[in-house]
Image: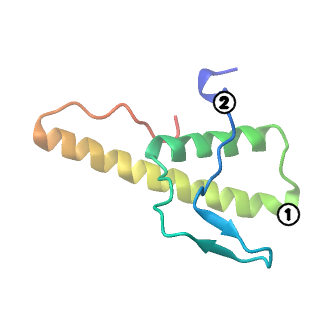
């Protein structure tokens, strides 16, 4: 299996630590800043979607939704990568190591 298809197991963290469940299906925010998602995190999400779909984790009726979401994420990461490379070239620096969809 290719290295990019391997997903390292990490300890599960709460997505939003500052959310309080009211028990009525509503969530209140306590005013703290939520944890941010980096471009590396988004790239790993795209890898997880790709890996899960290759293992048959999605039903047929879910594939269009998952595919559309994956395409949006991949396109966003590609645009950001291109912008970072253009900025680095204009400043005479090397492009950042973060890659979209690799």
- Mark 2 closeness class: few <14, some 14–19, many ≥20 residues within 10 Å: few
How many labels were placed on the picture? 2
> Left or right: 32 with respect to 1?
left
Depth check: 74 or 18 in front?
18
The residue that mark 1 highlights is 61
How far across and down, in percent of the image, does residue 91 sit? 11, 40
The circle on residue 7 is 2
How far across and down, in percent of the image, does residue 95 sit? 27, 34
Residue 57 higher or lower than 68, as above or below: above
Residue 20 higher or lower than 47, as above or below: below
> Left or right: 65 with respect to 31?
right
How far across and down, in percent of the image, does residue 44 sit? 57, 40
- The residue at the point 76 percent across, 41 percent down is 52
- The residue at the point 55 percent across, 69 percent down is 30
- The residue at the point 45 percent across, 46 percent down is 39
Displayed quadrant of residue 93 = top left
């Amino acid at each position: 299996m290719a290295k990019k298809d391997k997903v390292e197991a990490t300890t599960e963290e709460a997505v939003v630590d500052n959310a309080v469940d009211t028990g009525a299906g509503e969530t209140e925010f306590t005013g703290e800043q939520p944890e941010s998602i980096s471009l590396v995190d988004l790239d790993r999400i795209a890898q997880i979607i790709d890996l899960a779909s290759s293992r048959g984790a999605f039903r047929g009726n879910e594939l269009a939704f998952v595919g559309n979401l994956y395409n949006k994420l991949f396109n966003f990461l590609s645009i950001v990568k291109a912008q970072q490379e253009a900025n680095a070239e204009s400043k005479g620096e090397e492009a950042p190591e973060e890659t979209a969809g690799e």
